[in-house]
Image (tube, rainbow, N blue to C red):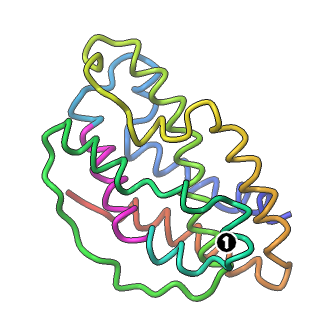
Amino acid sequence: MISEILKANTKVLHDLVEAKFNSRRIFDGSFSLNDYRNLILYNYLFLQNFENAVFSQISEPAAEELKLEKRRKLSLIEKDLQILNIGKAGTQNSEQIKNEAEAFGILYVMEGSTLGGNVIAKQLSRHSDFKDISFSYFRCYGENTGSFWKDFKTVMDREISPDHYDDCVSGAEKAYRFLLDASL
């Protein structure tokens, strides 16, 4: 199944992204509000560059089954930018998304970020520095986070045939590389 292949083949990139964003500090209590601002800004740039392009590549039947429109996060992260008093900035992605399989690979990173974001919000909300933070982006699915992730993997595993696995992995790698290469 492609979901397992993606997890195995992108683990190194995933770990590098976590290191770039100081993720270990989220759990040791030393993650600062400034670290969080950077995390939100990088995720905003990622969504700004990929969300519309990715969503437009997903077939209508798959989009319906995924409830894709409920998975849009750009407006939610813009609320977080406003609360954090961060101006919108960024550049539009010049790379094209090759096909639906590559789009699913990028969406894998987006949805995985949401899954991890729920844990991030829970952890950070325990600290007084974050008492006024709404976590609109990281809590976007609320109690449905687990079921949305499971549904996503089920649809992706069914939709992506073995002859498109490489494109799907390429999409996930493209997403992780964007996050690694992005600078503020």
124 to the left or right of 175? left
**Element under disc 1:** helix
Q: Is residue 128 magenta?
A: no
> Picture coordinates of residue 104 (x, y %)?
64, 70
Picture quarter containing residue 126? top left
Q: Which residues are magenta?
A: 37-50
Give me the residue at 59% from left, 75% from top: 103
Q: How many marks?
A: 1
Closest to the observer, 86 or 7: 86
> Picture coordinates of residue 34 (x, y %)?
21, 33
Give me the residue at 38% from left, 47% from top: 20
> Picture coordinates of residue 45 (x, y %)?
31, 61
Circle 1 residue = 169
> Picture coordinates of residue 160 (x, y %)?
79, 75
Q: Is residue 45 magenta?
A: yes
Vertical arrangement, residue 22 with respect to residue 174, above or below: above
Closest to the observer, 41 or 15: 41
Give me the residue at 82% from left, 64% from top: 157
Q: Quadrant of the image for the N terminus? A: bottom right
